[in-house]
Image (spheres, grey):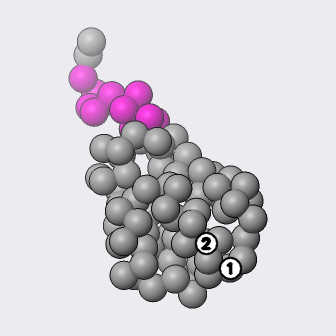
Amino acid sequence: MNKDVIQGKWKEIKGDLHKAWANVSDDEWEKTKGDATAIAGVLQQKYGMAKEDASKKVSALMDKYLSRTRESLDKPSDPNRKA
């Protein structure tokens, strides 16, 4: 996933991570610095998930934000503006 998207949306992503996996503290999420591999590692530790399962869950969550970003980039900023 694009690192710029992660940085720009980190607070939102972290909020969704916390909603999905409440046993992980805010400090633990911050230590991952938004790195998907590190986030999956935290899930493995805290929830005993298999590496592949944790990676898939993190990828699905991150892909949601990437899709939203792509959609917003595809939309014109002013729908009344003539091309």
79 falls in the magenta region: yes
Q: Residue at x 33, y 28 (%)?
A: 76
**Mark carried by residue 66:** none
Is residue 12 something that shows in the picture?
no
Apparent side of residue 42 relative to residue 77 in the rendered image (left or right)? right
Residue for point 40% across, 40% down: 2
- Residue bearing mark 1: 47
Mark 1 residue element: helix
Q: CA distance from mark 1 to mark 2?
A: 5 Å
Q: In x, y percent, where is residue 21?
A: 59, 78
Please indicate whether residue 33 sits to the left or right of residue 59 in the image. left
Query: Where is residue 12 drawn, in percent x and y?
Result: 40, 65
Report the residue at 36% width, 81% height from top.
Answer: 27
Q: Is residue 71 located in the magenta-colored stretch of the structure?
A: yes
Q: Point out the residue furthest to the top here.
A: 83
* Amino acid beneath label 1: Tyr
Mark 1 touches mark 2? (CB < 8 Å): yes
Quick check: can you spot residue 52? yes
Tell me the kind of residue under disc 2. Answer: Leu
Residues drawn in magenta: 70-81
Q: Quadrant of residue 13?
A: bottom left
Q: Nearer the viewer, residue 14 or 78?
A: 14
Reading the image, the residue beneath label 2 is 43
